[in-house]
């Protein structure tokens, strides 16, 4: 039996493979910009990345693609090819909505703002930062308007759709509105309960080299493939690169090892997702991670569901002692207390899993009106101070570096991303609820260091699926139901009050 001829679809695949290879180079250059590039290379690198953004935009908006997409839709494609074509069309439509001069101008502004942020944040220099942030927001609004006009959405929904396809602010409002109702009470209950606990705080300093070695051992425990990726250091932890060459970063403080360790574990979840995306479709949009919410569900499956699991502390103890020596504070039960300690703090990436959603709600409630034009950049600090007091009871007035300047996202033009963190926490809770339902011995296996059942489930249900299914269908196939935020609440109440 002969294979059906699909010349238009095959031509589309060849074009996307070329885009993938050029995107590979762009990703590595972007990683190097954040990890190793000397500061005097900033302008040249920004211009090079903007040039590459422009080239990729040209390739993605080639007028010939429209005809190929239409012709491929009439070819005898199988189910996977149909899904692949759907994703190709989604990428094509998004690219064609935005003009090339905006793509290049936005790229330059974002690179400049992010580079300056590295010096301005430690200096608490809001006045300097705001000058660089204004053009970033201006271009983000302009991009949002083009995307909104094309898709018939609001400006913020158009940006949210770039990170979480199909998600709308109305749904985020519903989910976050519910969270806002019960989260403050839960934080108070947990803190009251933990106030009776005796916790030993390990004594530093903890040399960065020892912390790095500890992080590498934790990555090995979690199955990271070091022949297809590496760990480095940057001002803000992230996971970049490409599935064939994953580039992760973390950061170190000599007075605390947990921030680096948990950050490394978090990024390892991202890394393993990328390393296990479907190789047979690699280079095509259908092989990409489905959304940032699903991506964050993987990092939080590793950092919160696994690493903060009471049984996992016993696996970490020998690793910590191997690299940092012996202290009473390194005992497994104490490590677990440290990793599940709940207390409102200024810094999102260091927050515990109970207070973390408050950080996300705060950012969402600022970035949405900012993109819609209801507020301006100059309004951010006062709004931040008010919402930080309201949600976490903390005073950030005048403290920009631990307040509205702490994240790299807005300076890089990543508006619409923040809701994905808490959506990811909800997905992760749902994955583990499903695993426990299907495998009642899961918690005992984790405590014994038998992590393969977790990784096999994630690989089968999430990693290997790429973007074959749209998000609601992927979630239903993985867990048997639509996204159910109740799993997240039940997880927090069971772990912290049960």
Image (cartoon, rainbow, N blue to C red):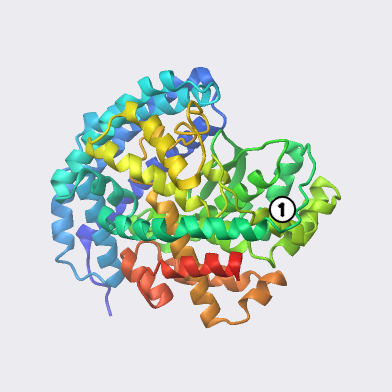
Whether residue 282 can be seen here: no
Name the residue at the right extreme. Answer: 326
Residue 405: percent from left, percent from top? 46, 31
Left-right relation of 179 to 344: left
Whether residue 47 sits left or right of residue 70 in the image: it is right
**Residue found 33% across the figure and 40% down from its top:** 367
Quick one: quadrant of the C terminus? bottom right
- Of 43 and 185, nearer the camera is 185
128 shown above or below 442? above
Q: Secondary structure at mark 1?
A: helix
Q: How far from the left and from the top, in percent, is residue 361?
A: 40, 49
Residue drawn at (35%, 61%), measured in percent from left and top? 467
Q: Which residue is mark 1?
A: 217
Q: Nearer the viewer, residue 441 or 192?
A: 192
Q: Quadrant of residue 82?
A: bottom left
Question: Looking at the image, which is closer to me, 228 or 296?
Answer: 296
Left or right for 235, reference 114? right
Within 10 Å of the Cα at label 1, are there few (<14), some (14-19), or many (20+) other Cα atoms?
A: some
Looking at the picture, how far across and down is residue 396, in whole percent?
A: 49, 33
Say if residue 313 shows up in the picture: yes
- Of 187 and 172, the residue lying toward us: 187
Residue at the image point whose x is 39% and y is 78% from the top:
480
Where does the N terminus fall, quadrant-wise?
Answer: bottom left
Q: x, y (%) of residue 381?
A: 40, 30
| Above-or-below relation of 482 to 297 | below
Total numbered circles:
1
């Amino acid at each position: 039996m002969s294979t059906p001829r699909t010349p238009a679809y095959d031509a589309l695949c060849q074009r996307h493979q070329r885009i993938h290879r050029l995107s590979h180079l762009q990703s590595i250059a972007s990683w190097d910009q954040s990890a190793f590039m000397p500061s005097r290379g900033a302008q040249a690198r920004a211009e090079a990345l903007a040039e590459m953004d422009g080239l990729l935009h040209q390739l993605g908006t080639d007028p010939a693609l429209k005809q190929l997409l239409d012709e491929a839709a009439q070819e005898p494609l199988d189910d996977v090819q149909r899904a692949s074509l759907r994703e190709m069309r989604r990428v094509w439509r998004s690219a064609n909505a935005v003009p090339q001069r905006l793509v290049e101008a936005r790229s330059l502004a974002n690179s400049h703002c992010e580079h300056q942020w590295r010096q301005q944040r430690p200096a608490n220099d809001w006045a300097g930062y705001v000058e660089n942030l204004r053009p970033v927001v201006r271009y983000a609004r302009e991009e949002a308007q083009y995307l909104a006009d094309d898709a018939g959405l609001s400006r913020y929904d158009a940006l949210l759709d770039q990170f979480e396809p199909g998600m709308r602010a109305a749904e985020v409002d519903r989910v976050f509105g519910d969270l806002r109702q019960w989260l403050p009470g839960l934080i108070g209950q947990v803190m009251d309960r933990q106030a009776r606990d005796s916790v030993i705080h390990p004594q530093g300093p903890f040399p960065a080299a020892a912390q790095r070695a500890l992080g590498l051992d934790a990555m090995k425990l979690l199955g990271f493939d070091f022949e297809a990726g590496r760990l480095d250091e940057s001002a803000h932890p992230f996971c970049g690169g490409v599935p064939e060459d994953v580039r992760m970063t973390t950061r170190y403080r000599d007075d605390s090892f947990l921030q680096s360790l948990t950050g490394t574990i978090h990024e390892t979840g991202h890394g393993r997702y990328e390393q296990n995306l479907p190789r047979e479709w690699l280079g095509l949009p259908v092989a990409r991670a489905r959304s940032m919410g699903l991506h964050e569900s993987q990092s939080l499956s590793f950092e919160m569901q696994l690493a903060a699991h009471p049984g996992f502390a016993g696996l970490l103890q020998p690793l910590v002692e191997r690299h940092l020596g012996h202290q009473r504070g390194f005992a497994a039960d104490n490590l677990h207390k440290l990793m599940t300690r709940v207390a409102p703090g200024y810094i999102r990436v260091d927050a515990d899993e109970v207070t973390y959603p408050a950080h996300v709600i705060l950012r969402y409630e600022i970035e949405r009106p900012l993109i819609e034009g209801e507020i301006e950049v100059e309004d951010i600090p006062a709004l931040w101070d008010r919402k930080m007091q309201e949600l976490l009871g903390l005073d950030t007035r005048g403290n920009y570096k631990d307040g509205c300047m702490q994240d790299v996202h807005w300076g890089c033009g990543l508006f619409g991303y923040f809701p994905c963190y808490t959506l990811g926490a909800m997905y992760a809770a749902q994955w583990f609820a499903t695993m426990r339902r299907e495998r009642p011995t899961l918690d005992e296996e984790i405590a014994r260091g038998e992590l393969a059942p977790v990784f096999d489930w994630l690989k089968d249900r999430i990693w290997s699926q790429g973007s074959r299914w749209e998000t609601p269908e992927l979630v239903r196939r993985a867990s048997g139901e639509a996204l159910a935020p109740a799993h997240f609440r039940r997880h927090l109440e069971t772990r912290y009050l049960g």
